[in-house]
Amino acid sequence: MDASTTVYHGLEVDTGFARFVETQVLPGTGVDADRFWKGYAQLLAECADENAELLARREKLQSQIDDWHRANQPMDPAAYRAFLTDIGYLVPEPAAFTIDNGDVDPEIASLSGPQLVVPVSNARFALNAANARWGSLYDAMYGSDVMGPVPTGGFDTARRDAVVAKAAKFLDETFPLAVGSHADVTEYALNGDKLQVTVDGQTAGLADPSLFVGVRKDGADTAYVLRHNGLHVELVINADHPIGAASASGLRDVVMESAPTAIQDCEDSVAAIDAADKIGVYGNWLGLMKGDLTESFDKGGKTMTRRLADDRQITRPDGSILTLPGRALLLVRNVGHLMTTDVVRLNGKPTPEGLMDAMVTTACAIHDLKRTHGLGNSRKGAIYIVKPKMHGPDEAAFADRVFTRVEEVLGLAPNTVKLGLMDEERHTSANLAACIHAIRNRIVFINTGFLDRTGDEIHTSMQAGPFVGRDGMKNSVWLKAYEDRNVLIGLAAGMKGRGQIGKGMWAKPDAMAEMLEVKIGHPKSGATTAWVPSPTAATLHAMHYHMVDVAARQADMTGQPLPGLDLLLTPALADAPMPQDQLMRELDNSAQGILGYVVRWVDQGIGCSKVPDIDDVQLMEDRATCRISAQYLANWLEHGLITTDQVEDALRRMAAKVDGQNANDPAYSPMAPGFDGPAFQAARDLVLTGAKQPSGYTEPALHARRAEAKAKAKAKAKA
């Protein structure tokens, strides 16, 4: 046994991690250390082998699918579906049912709006996401490309005026006045129980007075609070403010209720491979659940400190007080079933990391449940955990049993833990109703993770033939069927008014004008939420949920027929050879994207960041986007569209480009000219062994190479 390990009930636990659990996590939960470690040991004894068996089942199914495709080209859809049924990949649809998930917070059950997703390993990002419940529309417009190129000089008064005009147009469409336009208001005032406005010397009010909620005072600011489609908007008046002084009405800002929910991510956007990393991840989640997380940083030579925002006190027209949450309702995304960790070992072997996440993130959240004052999260006594990368209903049922056992160990009532189901693997998509049924008593969320879903689509059908390029993939029949089926199956299962139906991430964090044009498609699809990469994006995307009444849209969609399963199971194969110049362009693009992401992951432990693409456009990259690029190249290698030599050449050329893109980062270590460091080798691993990686996931290769990089850095520091 290693000297840095402590034994508890047969478990070998990293001593520093055990100290963190016992001195920081458990005090105040009512769970003592012996009960925790004994229960954890029992959980592993009961579930670790089953976890491994489920992973072996995945591999067996994939092997059978690979063999079938090799022997059955071209593919006959009816024969393919019959084969998938015979091997148990497709299961019978459950009889009609309605989920019964207990008491759920309104942000989950009934409120439609953006959902922010951030790495919980970064305390500043975690706090920004929690506080993104409210955001300035003026700031979001002024500081993004919504109003044209982002300004780099001093304050632009013409841009300010354009922002004010665009915001007034939004207000006219969302909160129309009985007379005139918000652009022409000279005074907002409270008249009895109504909001009164003065326009061109006339006094009037809102066309629908019921949209007025009340008034909030904050120093010199007076905010008139409105509500539409469940979301609040504040008209902030302060004639002495520099912005308010330029307005006849004194309107200095329009503040949006932006992100009702946020996911604190322990998975795709995080690089956590050992005890120290996991303590950092869990420590920030613990601080959020205790309400005391802070982060200080330097900005313009001044020390700034982030902390959780207070709730907002609104005085209603009748004089009563309405308290609105100041923070997004927080969910935490655990890792999937695949990876193991040596932070906790059983019989000398690593144990499933997902079981560690289940125990520790749930224990951290008990602090929120026991809170009697201060900044809380759930007002319904629930813990919200998103479980990703599950393959089919057996794995969903396993997750349900795991959390039932965790609840027993930690003394929680049954189904206190609510689960979000990521519909991001084809085995789950093809059996979505059965997956929902398996966790029907705790499910609160389904989401189409189209990035991972694309990677899994390629890997599952790796042997069916070469896939079309990225543009063709976006227009493929399986993708539309996937997005439509997700919403309709969720509605049929009774998710409306009981849980979120979500859509995927906007991956261009600097392209907000394009997002405003495109992402309205998500609420139009009947989804109650969709992922955004920043507080600015949340504020802008919130406008879409005023433009679209999602509840009404869902009512219209309920009962619509599902797109056929054959459409979902049709891989997007190329029907003609890709032009060589396009193929080489896509090869370079994928190689550059993999390297740009992997070099930060492996060398610096950055799990998610803005990475410039081959054209120097900043894109949000995480393991899901990396999975797509790696699986594309693995598929084309498998079918002879590209060669290993071409891949090696592209990786070397793109490594030099990525080095140049990161030249101003003092922490960056160039990959060229040696091309022998762990980061470059990780990129090679992902492509050259991509067809053999479990489900095409990036984690095994990245974890191994990150461990190698950390070991080298440690040895260098000792030398």
Image: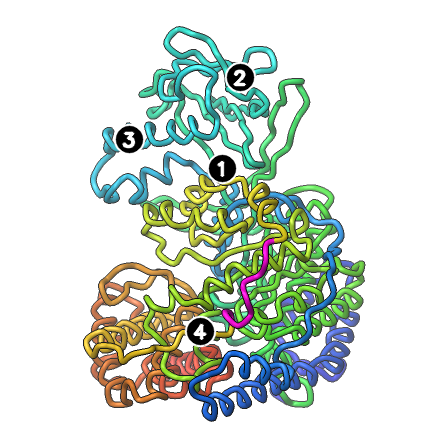
Residue lying farthest to the top in this orientation: 201
Residue 546, labelled with which disc?
Answer: 1
Look at label 4 and name its amino acid.
Gly
Please state which of the two labelled residues, at mark 3 or mark 4, is closer to the viewer: 4
Tell me the residue that label 3 is attached to: 162
Please state which of the two labelled residues, at mark 1 or mark 2, is closer to the viewer: 1
Secondary structure under tag 2 reads strand
Secondary structure under tag 1 reads helix
Look at label 1 and name its amino acid.
His
Q: Are marks 4 and 1 in contact (CB under 8 Å)?
A: no
Cα–Cα gap, marks 2 and 4: 52 Å
Task: Answer yes or no: is residue 328 visible.
Answer: no
Residue 521 position in % (x across, y down): 44, 50
Look at label 2 and name its amino acid.
Leu
Which mark is first along the chain, 2 or 3? 3
Figure quadrant of the C terminus: bottom left
Tell me the residue that label 2 is attached to: 195
Which mark is first along the chain, 4 or 3? 3
Relative to the observer, which residue lies in front, 656 or 688?
Answer: 688
In the image, taking residue 18 as reference, residue 237 lies left or right, namely: left
Residue plotted at (21% across, 72% down) = 657
Figure quadrant of the N terminus: bottom right
Residues drawn in magenta: 560-568
